[in-house]
Image (tube, grey):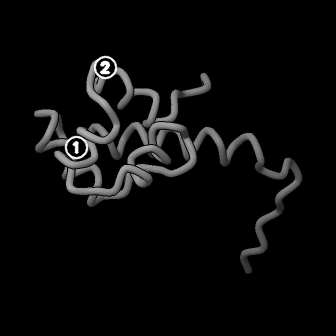
Amino acid sequence: MYNPAHPGEVLKAYLEGVTVTTAAKKLGVTRVTLSRILNGKAGISAEMALRLSQALNTSADMWLAIQLDYDLWQARQHQPTNVQLMFT
């Protein structure tokens, strides 16, 4: 599997030419909240996915799928290699 982009990187492409302040106001979130997402310091929540879908005419599912792909890839990079399941 490849190293998927953080959803903030994808969002940057959608917001090209729009300031963080303007985008945050349109989304109804603080500038700090949006900046954290755009800089890869925070993820896309279900609520944010809904806000993005309405503001950008995309689907909430798309944003959540991007976040899930990123999270799963990150988890796999830190997964212990010798995990043993103990089912009886």
Front residue of 56 and 30: 30
Q: Position of residue 44 (x, y in %)?
A: 39, 50
| Quarter of the figure with the C terminus | bottom right
Residue at 74% x, 40% y: name it.
77
Query: Residue shown at 24%/39% (left/top)?
Result: 22
From this view, report whether residue 16 is shown above or below residue 8. above
Q: Residue furthest right?
A: 82
Q: Is residue 84 left or right of residue 67?
A: right
Mark 1 surroundings: few (<14), some (14-19) or many (≥20) residues within 10 A: many
1 to 74, vertically: above or below: above
Residue 64 - label: none
Q: Nearer the viewer, residue 26 or 60?
A: 26
Image quadrant in which the N terminus is located:
top right
Dividing the picture into quarters, in which one does residue 53 lie?
A: top left
Q: Position of residue 39 (x, y in %)?
A: 53, 38
**Can you give x and y, in whole percent of width and height, for residue 65 in the image?**
36, 41
Q: Closer to the camera: disc 1 or disc 2?
A: 2
**In the image shown, does 78 or 48 lie closer to the viewer?**
48
In three-dimensional space, the C-alpha distance between marks 1 and 2, rounded to whole angstroms, equals 14 Å
Out of 29 and 57, give the one closest to the viewer. Answer: 29
In this rendering, position of residue 69 left or right of residue 49: right
Vertical order, 64 against 3 (above or below) = below
**Disc 2 marks which residue?**
16
SS assignment at label 2: loop
Residue type, numbered disc 2: Glu
Residue drawn at (57%, 47%), measured in percent from left and top? 41
Quick one: label 2, few (<14), some, or many (20+) residues within 10 Å? few
For badge 1, the amino acid type reads Leu
Disc on res. 52:
1
Where's residue 34, x and y in %?
Answer: 39, 47
